[in-house]
Amino acid sequence: MAKGYFRASYFSGMETISWNDFEKVELRVGTVIDVFEFPKARKPAYKMKIDFGPYGIRMSSAQITRHYTPETLLGRQVVAVINFPEKQIADFMSQCLVTGFADENGDIVLTAVERTVPNGTKIA
C-alpha cells in the first residue's frame, strides 16, 4: 500500500463520498468586510458580511466570539460553503457557512488561509 493511503476500513464509521460529491461543495474564500454583535442568537455569535468577489457579498452568523473580536475579524479571509440554502438564525438569514474546527473546549477556530488569495477562489 502506498504511503499516505489508507484502506476504507481505517475510517470505520465514516461515510465516504465520491469525488463528484466533493466537487459540488462550493468551499470558497471571502474577506470579512463588516462584523456585528448578534445578541438575539442563542449562543454568543457575530453576524459577518463577507465579500466573495464574483459570488457577491453574503451574510453569515458564526459562533466564534471566544477566540475573535470584531476588530480581529475585519479584513480577514475566511473559508465558507456558499452553496447551502439560507438558514434562519433568530431574526437573521445566514447565507453561507463559515468553516472552522472545535478546540479542546469546543470553541471554534476558523479555517485559515495561509496567504491572501482572490475573493471567491474555490478550494483546490
Image (cartoon, helix red, strand yellow):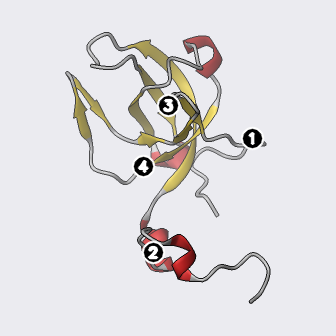
Q: Position of residue 36 (x, y in %)?
A: 43, 14
- Mark 3 or mark 1, earlier in chain: 3
Q: Amino acid at mark 4?
A: Ile
Q: Residues within 10 Å of mark 4 (few under 14, many from 20)?
A: many
- Whole-angstrom CA distance, mark 2 to mark 1, is 31 Å
The residue at 21%/23% (across/down) is 90
- Judging by the rendered image, the residue that carries numbered circle 3 is 106
Q: Position of residue 83 (x, y in %)?
A: 37, 54
Q: Amino acid at mark 3?
A: Gly
- Mark 3 or mark 4, earlier in chain: 4
Q: Which mark is residue 116?
A: 1
Q: Which mark is residue 29?
A: none
- Which is nearer the eye, 5 or 96? 5
Q: Which mark is residue 16?
A: 2
The residue at 42%/49% (across/down) is 82
- Which is nearer the eye, 116 or 15? 15
